[in-house]
Amino acid sequence: MNCQQARPLIEPYADGELDAAAVLELERHVRECPACALALDKAQALQTALGQDALCFAAPPELRRRVKAELRSAAGVRSGWRWGNWNWLSGVSTALATASVALLLILTLNRPSGQERLAQEIVASHIRSLMANHELDVVSTDQHTVKPWFNGKLDFSPPVKDLSAQEFPLVGGRLD
Amino acid sequence: MLPHLEAAYNLARWLAGNDHDAQDVAQEASLRAFKFFAGFRGENTRAWLLTIVRNTFYNWLQKNRPRELAGDLGDEALEIEDGSANADPTHLRRADAETVRRALAELPVEFREVMVLREMEGFDYKEIAGLCEVPIGTVMSRLSRGRKLLQKRLAAEFKPEDPR
């Protein structure tokens, strides 16, 4: 390596950006060339001068306070929205749960015993799904999405009805 | 965004040149970073935040001091070459923070930013290139020119104290 080749590598060397082979070659050249050694010394001296901690500006405490306050209020807006959303969801699921309990009660009370057993099974599996927190296998308000979903999972095609008109909107399907 | 507020403020302070504007830039950048954090897919949060600080600063500069944007690097770059000749490593090593700070603050912003990112924030060439949205070669040449210019200014600072 000659000086012409070495010079452009001196700063990248000081910055730790050279690969191992170039490092070895440059170090060999610098040992033999006082001019390049001086250039490297200058580069490293400048890094020392610029590396003083005192050169970094510390963030003023009032900036930290202001940013903290602003982030908190920005985060507050966001989590408030989430909280509202969650309230809405839990309201809906409470309504759904109440509706299905009412439906099952009607079924249980008004139907003959054969239906009663079916209702009990439905209630039991519904409770199981609530315990596992897994109410739906397929989430969709569209009959034409829910019905095909059962294809191949059952040896018959279950009727999928949208009872929105009766205030029981379709929310999806589950296989028990 | 708070963990990197020091870095955000330091860069903003070096770019804007005074505390008041730097605080505005750092604060706005932190908020923007917070808003867009959900969309961030990278690994280096600090580099990402500093990219936002830098963009916020240039937007701010365009709005408040548009004349500084028109800075032409060409002329100054030409006369840099012999600048480091007078620099004495011993003097450089002993330079006090105030002198270095003054000399660095006088450099054109394009040089100042790469030097702050390299020497104070410790980013490598590739990270600086990503942060400043320029090729690595440009980072290297800006660093090199900035350093020569700084050496020259520091050498001039030492002369009156130490005549030879």
Image (cartoon, coloured by chain):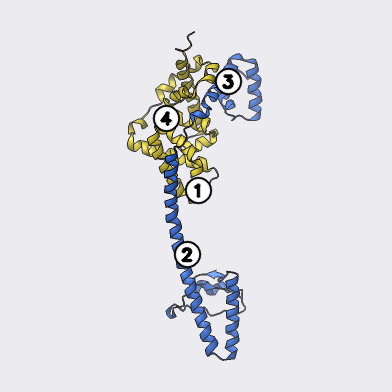
Residue annotated with mark 2: A86
Secondary structure beneath dot 3 equals helix
For marks 2 and 4, give the one nearer the viewer. Answer: 2
Separation of marks 3 and 2 at Cα, in angstroms: 63 Å
For disc 2, the chain is: A
* Type of the residue with mark 1: Phe
Residue at 65% across / 29% down in the picture?
A: A20
The spot of residue A27 in percent (x, y) is 64, 22
Residues B22 and A47: in front is B22
Residue annotated with mark 3: A40
For disc 3, the chain is: A
Q: In the picture provided, is A62 more to the left or to the right than A109? A: left
Q: Residue furthest top?
A: B164
The letter of the yellow chain is: B
> Chain A appears what colour?
blue
Label annotation for residue B109: 4
